[in-house]
Amino acid sequence: PPPAGCHSLSLDSSAQILGQSHPQGCRRANMVIEIENFHGVYLLYCTNPKYKGRIYIGYTVNPERRITQHNAGKKKGGAWRTSGRGPWDMVLIVHGFPSDIAALKFEWAWQHPQLCHLVKHVSRKARTEASFDYHLRVMWELLGTCRWRRMPLTLRWLRQEYRRECPLERAPPPHMPLAYGQVRVRPAQVRQGCESPAPGSRCDVCNGRLTGNSETLSCIQPLCSSQSHIVCLAQLFLQGESNQLVPLEGQCPGCRNTVLWGNLIRHRNGCYGDLENVTTTCQGHWADELKV
């Protein structure tokens, strides 16, 4: 069974806890999302009565394979800290990191919060506090720090029975979706709508020639064929935020719809989930309150 205190919440209420309205940022619980170029940091929970309540944090490029290795033991590729102490449940994963280095830095900070200057302010684990709850507190804080809060990350509950409410004061940025259900790694391949630009294609921002898929982003709108250089589109989206490198959202130069930068990157990297458009509300942009 999951640790005491877990709540069975509807998708609507969970989304509202994170400052989002359904379906924005939420995914159907039974959907298996397929993703290429996967980099994720996961949380394991031990269900063995002898070691019940222990947790483990790790990095993986393939969640399905990794949990099998953990439960099979060290000789099958599992970590020595989890070997012989299973079974383990992989209950939560943060994914969408642009590289293994970015993910490994997050893993280290999550494992060693008292050594990471970004979250040294987080109070130490109380004697009566479960390790599961403490590391969730650390994770909420990490997602809001300057190093990761602009990345196109997804917080995914793989096992809903373990799900916990996020404190409102620690809610991650709205561009980080809260997702539910399993994730599967898919081998990299050419995808419809993400092929290399046709000969003679030009960037919708600078009108320069598009020479390859490696430098191109395509709009995710089904009826929009807009393509742009990654750098050009980033500069367009960052107008008014000259001190930033990673955009949050912007207006497609083709269809003029507001799209999340993270959704463009997820689509380019092979995320086959349902990607929604999000428009900025009249209450002001959450980035206005960031201090980098």
Image (cartoon, rainbow, N blue to C red):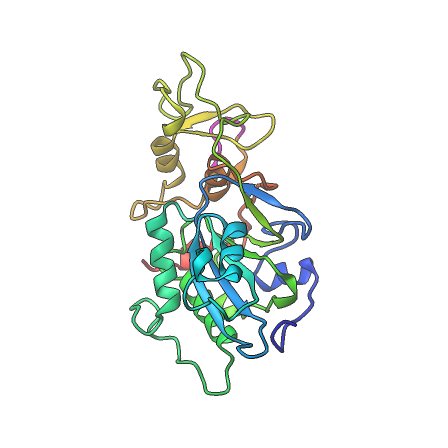
- Most common SS among magenta residues: loop
Which image quarter is the N terminus in?
bottom right
Q: Give the residue at x 52% y 59%.
A: 72
The extreme top residue here reads 200
The extreme bottom residue here reads 127
Foreground residue among 75 and 226 = 75
Foreground residue among 1 and 27 = 1
- Residue 118 inside the magenta-drawn segment: no
Q: Is residue 252 above or below residue 129?
A: above
| Residue 61 pos. (x, y %) | 45, 48
Q: Give the residue at x 67% y 58%.
A: 11
Q: Is residue 51 above or below residue 247?
A: below
254 left or right of 216? right
Span shown in magenta: 251-255
Quadrant of the image occupied by residue 74: bottom left
| Residue 205 pos. (x, y %) | 39, 26
Q: Is residue 228 above or below residue 88?
A: above
Q: Give the residue at x 47% y 29%.
A: 253
| Residue 86 pos. (x, y %) | 54, 68
Q: Is residue 147 visible?
A: no
Q: Give the residue at x 35% y 75%.
A: 121
Q: Is residue 128 visible?
A: yes
